[in-house]
Image (cartoon, rainbow, N blue to C red):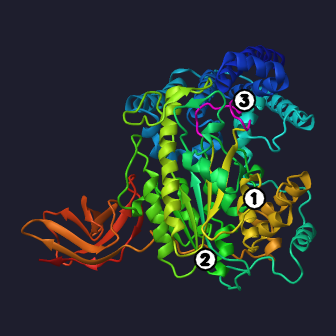
Amino acid sequence: MSRKSAYLELLKQAIILLGISVLVVIEMEWLNHRSFSKFLLFLREHPVMFLVNVQIVFNTFMFGEMWRRRRAWRWTIFLMWMALGVANYMVTSYRILPFTTRDFLLIKDGLKMITVYFTWPEIIAMFGAIAALIAGIALLFIKMKPRKSFNRLASITVFVLILAVTLLTGKMAVEAKWINWERKSLVKAYSDFGFAYCFTYTFADFGIEKPEEYSEELVDEIAEDIVPVDKPLIVEPDETVEEPEEITPNILFVQMESFFDVNGLLDTEFSENPIPVFTELKEKWPSGALKVPSVGGGTANTEFEVLTGMNLDYFGAGEYPYNTVLSDTTCETICFNLKPLGYTATAIHNYMGTFYSRDTVYSQLGFHRFVSQEYMNDLEYNPLGWAKDRSLTGEILQALETTEGRDFVFTVTVQSHGKYPDTPIEGLDTIQVLSCREPVNEVMLSNFVNELYEVDQFIGELIAELETFDEPVVLVLYGDHLPALEVEDEGLECGDMFQTTYVIWNNFGMDFEAPDLEAYRLTANLLKQLGIDNGVLTHYHQAAAPYEDGDGYLALLRVLEYDMLYGDLVIYNGENPYEPTDLQMGTVPITISSATYSPSTGTFAVLGENFTPFSSIVVNGERLDTVFDNSGKILAKVASLEPDSEAYVGQFTKENEELSRTEIIKVQEK
């Protein structure tokens, strides 16, 4: 084939593929916007971005033209884009936040709760479809014959040219402000910029990009501006300092799953107030609006902002720092900053300890203890299988009572987690939804608010206990994000899906202020009122007015975040002062005092302390089917044992992951 003929053939194929690309993008954006009318609105308001998305898809098709089996590549690329579009539609149906490349890092966590969101027939159908897709693609490459001859150089040349045009178009779109990620939520970005662009953007968008203004001199200037000359910027965790003149209470944060003031839903009426306790707290105690980084999901990202004081906007689109930078890096947090004052930091969460890698990440964040559901007794579960929150009251009190000094206790609830079924749940009908605004599903909302009602009761029970607690306590209550209920900005009194509410309560009569805040400023604001200022970002946020969020303030915050996690650690004089903690699982250690085996009955008994239903006996490396008798005794049936056998007790998740183990002891025969 002559060079001219090759280029003419490529031009012909390119025109065909361009048309297919347009159809693919139309289909994906229809799914992305969830209705054809909203897709047409996107087309009218963002025509340039529609073309950018077409160019991206077209580029992938042209990649296939460089290979002999181009027909197989075409079908593969077509099927992959269709699969990604459907995946995005399904993901946004259950959590609102769109599908990104980061979700591939969360597959392990997603599988842990797949049965909550899908029925077994749906799960089988999904995995069957994935298997069929993989098999189909493999079959394409086997059955479709390769081209006998083609001009690969011409194909590569055209592909490179089209890629260059695509990159140039993207650059022009950014410079013309058609694309601007600054302070734009992921939901809004996918809506404005399109699925193909946003999804491919997240491939390379990891961590915090180095700010142009970043330099050692600038970081030093920031440090000089936020800290008096006679005060240190940070006191390292292993050092001690005198307590501030103000009272230093136990500090409790309770981050409530999908909790928000449902009375702020427009055109919605309930048979009674679903959250009477929280409503009364808002009226009698300081409260304010809290801007959170997530909606419909992403609990760990709200945690991250609250604990670290860092603005998540500067990280990659859709990134979860728990799964990226914090997997091998420590980070300054309130836990580290309170340690010099003698505080013990405890995290409590009534769900699986390995979820979001909390069992390892909490060590990087400076916690001393982590109490996951595997270390709790007397758990009750709602119809969806989530642990009820009422048991957390006892866990919080135990955390306070088992240390000598002051405590920082960070609790994450789970009861009101989705999915919220679209069919009524028997017995979950204390609150009736009399009316609601479309597109919110009335039955799903009813199931949600009835769980919220029980969470509200937990708040009341916790405060009743803390009122009579013999140590000073300040309690901060807030919601991590709005639920995945198709609630839109227009359906909220506050007009913002990324806004929840926080309340500050205490048992020692102190007056607090609760201005409207971003989640990353919540901790610093509270500590300032307690006279505590240790930490770089604590100093930085406290030096600014509570309502300050101008470009200068945010730009310098970005510089500090980059320096602390990815830069030269100038703010720490070049060396990270924080070491991972030796994280203790459970409020108190699980111990064993004896392991005995009775050959006559085949009964294996282990005595000890603090066992839970998640405790398992492990003998000679083999995990036994264990029966929980009580917190001091667990049992198993064994046909026979080898002489000099050894045993320990391990705590295992429902996914059979071992979180911790006791010491190993010799087995005694009775």
Discs 3, 2 touching: Cβ within 8 Å: no
- Look at 35% across and 77% down and name the residue there: 663
Amino acid under disc 2? Tyr
Within 10 Å of disc 2 (Cα), the crowding (few <14, some 14-19, many 20+) is many
Amino acid under disc 3? Glu
Q: Residue beneath label 2, please? A: 343
Q: Secondary structure at mark 1?
A: helix
Could you tell me which quadrant the C terminus lies in?
A: bottom left
Is residue 273 rendered magenta in the image? no
Name the mark on residue 490.
3
Discs 1, 3 touching: Cβ within 8 Å: no
- Look at 73% across and 52% down and name the residue there: 312
Question: Which of disc 1 and disc 2 is earlier in sequence?
Answer: 2
Within 10 Å of disc 1 (Cα), the crowding (few <14, some 14-19, many 20+) is many
75 is higher (above) or lower (below) than 266: above
- Look at 50% across and 32% down and name the residue there: 446
Which quadrant of the structure image shows residue 429?
A: top left
Question: Which of disc 3 and disc 1 is earlier in sequence?
Answer: 3
Q: Secondary structure at mark 3?
A: helix
Q: Is residue 39 left or right of residue 324?
A: right
Q: Is residue 584 visible?
A: no
Q: Secondary structure at mark 2?
A: loop
* Rendered location of residue 309, percent (x, y): 73, 61
Considering every residue shown, the one lying at the far left of the view is: 600
Q: Is residue 596 left or right of residue 574?
A: left
Q: Which residues are magenta?
A: 483-495
Name the mark on residue 521.
1
Within 10 Å of disc 3 (Cα), the crowding (few <14, some 14-19, many 20+) is few
